[in-house]
Amino acid sequence: MATHVRICTHTVLERIHPSLALRSIHDERGRIITRFAELVEKHADELAVLESLDAGKHPAVTKAVDVGNAAGSLRYFAGAADKIHGETLKMQGPFQAYTLREPLGVAGLIIPWNFPTTMFAIKVAPALAAGCTMVVKPAEQTPLSALYLADLAKQAGIPDGVINVVPGFGPTAGAALASHMNVDMVSFTGSTEVGRLIMEASARSNLKPVYLELGGKSPLIIFGDADLDMAVELAISANFFNKGEACVAATRVYVQDSIYDRFEEKLAERMKSWVVGDPLTDARVNQGPQVDKTQYERVLSYIDQGKREGATLLTGGRPCGQKGCYIEPAVFTNVKEDMVIAKEEIFGPVMCLMKFKTVEEAIAKANDTRYGLGAGVVTRDLDVANRVVRSVRAGVVWLNCYFAMDSDCPFGGRKMSGFGKDEGMQALDKYLAVKAVVTPLRGSPW
Ligand code: ADP
């Protein structure tokens, strides 16, 4: 019935004037992306279990956070699809000029294994809204959700050939995308080392624009006036959420000397109730296994290195359980800024606890890194907060919170954490080409 009514209306409008019957392509695009979001929400349980099987993630958390964010991003950019405008320009002389914002072409989207569903959506959604076609290369460790999402996209009515998922290894499938002459841009999330390779591949091939969301070693600065319980909880979630497999994890925790001892004590006490295990079979589990053996061994070798360098383990730091890639979350104290564990991204449950005295010292320490992805500040003093927020070189600063993200909130780093934003309206720009159009003005005032 609904279809019939629509067809009749269409025909009547067409008889009045053909252009009235055309439904805007942008409007239609938005509708289809919304349908995609609805299907993602409908299949949230399946997606969460797939992520859990692939990456050891907690299914309930994954359903709420990863899948929730993915659907949110699709809805957000569905709304943006019919709001992509150019500008009217002011030319010197008798000319009329304006810009068109056109789809850039074929987008290469290379995504990592830590948040596969969310990463898929935050790159695919703006690319779809912009009108691009795309080749998605999921990480070799976690290809299942991308394939499932591609099927949902088809069910939503996204035409064949628009989203192409090509699972494969980085040095082959990923590198082929980065160096392909017919790929018009690459949006990549992963390690700083591979980000560099992707830029090199672009430079050697067709100079495609490249956007990189890379590693981090983010600081969390806790001032002496902080609510101690809240600060401890923040430090734990900012480090151990998703098993520490988060580029923006706040792995350098700086605590003001006035509260340092009490903070350390409370943190050690709180970690006693932290449960490591299989999140698929035990709902009480806070932390599942690392994504694979390679990553597990890499994290353990960093923990060994920390011990060798003279840092002290306050808690954890050992393999856990009889089988599987489980690690007791490690909290290191007596950490010096020049130790490897305080400098390099570990990508696992390893927190470095350090002390500071003054605001200036906290800012200097926070900025003493080649990375610039995120930062956290915990204080009730507005002046201190404003000062730190404006002095820290990072893509996002969380004040009295951490990890709060939203489709409207641009995400992406500075320095060697990369450039370009996922999420927020700025993400659309990556997938659009601006074309200036100039035409002479004859017989009109200018
Ligand atoms: P991680 O170190 O977190 O595993 P990587 O940067 O190695 O992150 O991987 C992130 C994504 O980049 C994955 O999809 C991976 O397959 C891909 N990748 C790895 N090496 C390359 C490469 N040389 N060129 C393009 N993509 C790559």
Image: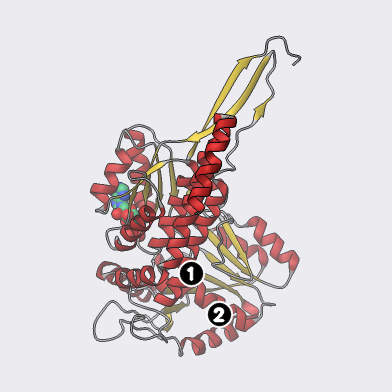
- Asked where in the image residue 272 lies, by quadrant, the reply is bottom left
Position of residue 407 measured from the top left corner of the image (x, y, whole percent)? 55, 57
Label at residue 194: none
For marks 2 and 1, the one nearer the N-term is 1
Give the residue at x 75% y 64%.
Answer: 383
Q: Amino acid at mark 2?
A: Glu
Give the alpha-carbon distance from disc 2 to disc 1, as whole Å: 18 Å
- Which residue ends up furthest to the top in the rendered image? 443
Label 2 secondary element: helix
Q: Residue at position x 53%, y 56% from top? A: 75
| Left or right, 215 with reference to 414 | left
- Whether residue 343 appears in this view of the structure is no
Q: Residue at x 44, y 71 (%)?
A: 63
Within 8 Å: ligand 1 and the Cβ of disc 1? no
The colour scheme is secondary structure
Q: Residues within 10 Å of mark 2 (few under 14, many from 20)?
A: some
Residue type for callout 1:
Val
Q: Which residue is mark 1?
A: 65
Nearest the eye: 156 or 81: 156
Q: Which mark is residue 233?
A: 2
Q: Secondary structure at mark 1?
A: helix
